[in-house]
Amino acid sequence: QVQLVESGGGSVQAGGSLRLSCAASEYSANTYPMAWVRQAPGKEREGVAAIDDSGTTRYADAVKGRFTISVTSAKKKSLYLQMNNLKPEDTGVYYCVADTRWLVLPSDKPADWLHFKYTGQGTQVTVSS
């Protein structure tokens, strides 16, 4: 079992930056993929960015060049999402997800990250124009 706790959300104007953090509870193995997914008001949840401990990173087309995902690999892993040049369409609840069933990222498709085994409680990001 892995517990995930997000922090760092808030309200910014378009063009601004935010950095999200996710603290994972200690787990017997520290090699598993993690990702960020988000859900905008009235829309379906979507994958944003994913990473594994081999250094592989993947991004949804909507955030490429603006967002950077990173992770610290330890017994208690920490996941980050640096978000620059934020747009109003980036508004939503951002969730940290993880899946201990895999050693590396199992899919390059953002839709597949939605099926990761563990999900945090989410943190709100609001971008005003």
Image (cartoon, rainbow, N blue to C red):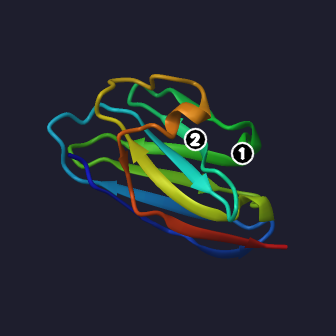
| Horizontal arrangement in the rendering, residue 8 relative to residue 110 (left or right) | left
Proximity of marks 2 and 1: CB atoms separated by less than 8 Å: yes
* Amino acid at the residue labelled 2: Ala
User: Going from the N terminus, do you reach mark 2 or mark 1 first?
Assistant: 2
Question: What is the x, y in percent for residue 28?
Answer: 14, 37
Where disc 2 sits, the SS reads strand
Q: Quadrant of residue 41?
A: bottom right
> 100 and 86: which one is in front?
100
| Horizontal arrangement in the rendering, residue 102 relative to residue 1 (left or right) | right
| Horizontal arrangement in the rendering, residue 117 relative to residue 62 (left or right) | left
Which residue is tagged 1?
63
Question: What is the x, y in percent for residue 22?
Answer: 40, 57
Question: What is the x, y in percent for residue 65?
Answer: 74, 42
Where disc 1 sits, the SS reads helix
Farthest right residue? Answer: 129
| Horizontal arrangement in the rendering, residue 39 relative to residue 65 (left or right) | left
Which residue is tagged 2?
49
